[in-house]
Image (tube, rainbow, N blue to C red):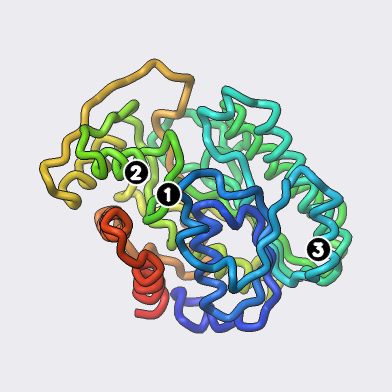
Amino acid sequence: MGEIKMADLSFYKGKKVLITGHTGFKGSWLCRILVGAGAEVTGYSLSAPTEPNLFALCDVEGHMNSVIGDIRDLDHLAKVFADTQPEIVFHLAAQPIVRDSYKDPVYTYETNVMGTVNICECVRRNSCVKSFLNVTTDKVYKNNEWEWGYRENEPLDGYDPYSNSKSCSELVTHSYINSFFNDMEVAVSTARAGNVIGGGDFANDRIIPDCVRAAGTKTDIIVRNPHSTRPYQHVLEPLAIYLTIAKAQYEDKKYAGFYNVGPDDRDCITTGELVDIFCEKWGESLNWVNQYDGGPHEANFLKLDCSKIKKVFGWQPRWRVEEAIEKTVEWSKMYLSGKDVCECMDEQIEEFFYK
């Protein structure tokens, strides 16, 4: 396969692509990439989860078919499939916040498990779909808090309702593959990605958005869990892999499988180290304070072994964590000063994919 190059995006020109969760942070970046590549994009999602939000800022709504709908609503989702006849499906819709999953576990399971059942069922019913990618998380694994990375064949048993619901989402997908998709033309994969950062994430309870909000108001950054180790990468890294997997399996079903999508080991850093780099890149004498709040259980140590995508796709991370933070700071400063963030997104996409 070689490295991810410009030719990979030219494949999407004229392709009918459905993205669930298109109004979210990752979904908005993915829409911008695919609209720019000339794909016929349909999105199916709830309204953007935050105000402000990247979907409104990134100016793609007028260039795609944006459907506001709930992934739990099978009838509505089925109608969108019937109307649009997608060839390629990216499933990103989810309740994605660990802390929120403690507050509302039922909604989390309904969205992340039954939502997966619904999208799998729509793929099963529509022979137009040739390539389907379910995006889950690095938190699907049973976390033993050990220092080596999890491989794709490790047990799936997330601890908290969010992580566990995503483990279930994987199992639902596996069952549909075994029971239905193996006998169909469609190729199906799951991608288990780590923590993504980048311009335009306005979520609560995520460290980089917290940093940007603090920088915007010139207050200290509050860090809840500075010693937890996470794999951090720029949002374009996993999106590039998703696009590569979806293309590869569309062209040859042998590429369908389960893939860890994360940075190199050297980019698995503690939250405290991440915030140090952010403060350095931002400047303006920005500081952070450790304020552990005794919140619900979250993993302290988690990283992925990404040997498989390196071997299968020749993948190498494009931007180190320092550069990922630099790009996030660049976007955020443009946003806070009222400049054109679309131009910034396009420049970063251009640099990442084409240079």
Identify the residue shown where x is 56% and y is 63%. Answer: 242
In this picture, residue 82 sits left or right of residue 335: right
Residue 61 at x, y = what percent?
Answer: 58, 66
- Answer with mark 3 or mark 1, whichever residue precedes in sequence: 3
- Answer with mark 2 or mark 3, whichever residue precedes in sequence: 3
Name the disc covering residue 81, or none. Answer: 3
Mark 2 residue type: Ile
View extreme (front): residue: 338
Report the number of numbered marks.
Answer: 3
**Disc 1 target residue:** 201
* Alpha carbon distance from label 1 to label 2: 8 Å
> Which quadrant would residue 289 be assigned to in this image?
top left
* Alpha carbon distance from label 2 to label 3: 35 Å
> Can residue 133 be seen?
no
Label 1 secondary element: loop
The correct choice, above or below, for 296 with respect to 319 in the image is above
* Alpha carbon distance from label 3 to label 1: 28 Å
| Label 2: few (<14), some (14–19) or many (≥20) C-alpha neighbours in 10 Å | many
**Disc 2 target residue:** 208
- Answer with mark 1 or mark 2, whichever residue precedes in sequence: 1
In this picture, residue 130 sits left or right of residue 149: right
> Can residue 52 be seen?
yes
Q: Are marks 3 and 1 in contact (CB under 8 Å)?
A: no
Residue 252 at x, y = what percent?
Answer: 69, 75
Mark 1 residue type: Asp
Q: Front-most of 87 and 341? A: 341
Identify the residue shown where x is 48% and y is 21%. Answer: 297
